[in-house]
Amino acid sequence: MKQPTAEEALAAALTAEYAAIYAYGRIGVRLTGAARDAAHQAEAAHRRRRDTVVVQLSTQGGTVPAGLAGYALPFPVTNRASALRLAIEVEERTAAHWRAALASTTGTDRDQALAALVEYAVRATRWRKVAGVTPPTVAFPGRPT
């Protein structure tokens, strides 16, 4: 299988950011207090990263994939427990896209991919702690299990 170009890897990560933003819209409404605040902060972080990648691809002459109006969620989000489960999954899936981008990128693009992977791995760990999931960490963040 051919390794994607840096542009393709960043575009795939951007698509994951779009999906994460959509999912956090569903997550936040099922949470309260500090967890809701954390969901709003996570959504804002994904929006900032999305905006950065859109500008980056645009200024480098790359193709910016369009976001969709909606995304299929892996399961219904009907209560706090399912919202927390989705938050963990969103961070893990988005981290996986940025981990994949590491192999295709160099320089500042690679630094950006690594920073995103670390940020999302830490956030997934925080969500696991809030949800009471043990162990709260995984050995290789962003790697399929």
Image (cartoon, rainbow, N blue to C red):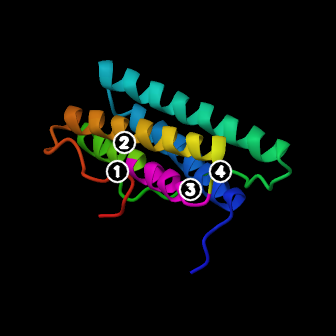
Q: Which mark is residue 141?
A: 1
**According to the image, label 3 marks what residue?**
101
* Position of the C terminus by quadrant: bottom left
| Cα distance in 3D space between marks 2 and 1 | 6 Å
Amino acid marked by disc 3: Ala
Q: Which residue is mark 4?
A: 69
Q: Is residue 95 magenta?
A: yes
Residue interval drawn in magenta: 92-104
User: Label 2 crowding class (10 Å Cα cut-off): few <14, some 14-19, many 20+?
Assistant: many
Q: Secondary structure at mark 4?
A: loop
Residue type of the residue flagged with mark 1: Pro
In front: 112, or 88? 112
Q: Nearer the viewer, residue 117 or 26?
A: 117
Whether label 4 touches label 3, CB < 8 Å: no
Left or right relative to 5: residue 26: left
Res. 108 image quadrant: top right
Left or right of residue 111: residue 92: left
Q: Residue at x 28, y 33 (%)?
A: 126
Secondary structure beneath label 3: helix
Q: Residue at x 39, y 54 (%)?
A: 142
Residue 15: horizontal and vertical position, in percent?
61, 53
Q: Is residue 61 magenta?
A: no
- For marks 1 and 3, give the CA distance: 14 Å
Q: Amino acid at mark 4?
A: Ala
Mark 3–mark 2 distance (CA, rounded to whole Å):
15 Å
| Mark 3 neighbour class, 10 Å CA radius: few under 14, some 14 to 19, many 20 or more | many
Horizontal relation, residue 7 to residue 20: left or right? right
Q: Where 130 falls versus 53 (above or below)? A: above
Q: Amino acid at mark 2?
A: Ala
Badge 1: how crowded within 10 Å, few (<14), some, or many (20+)?
many
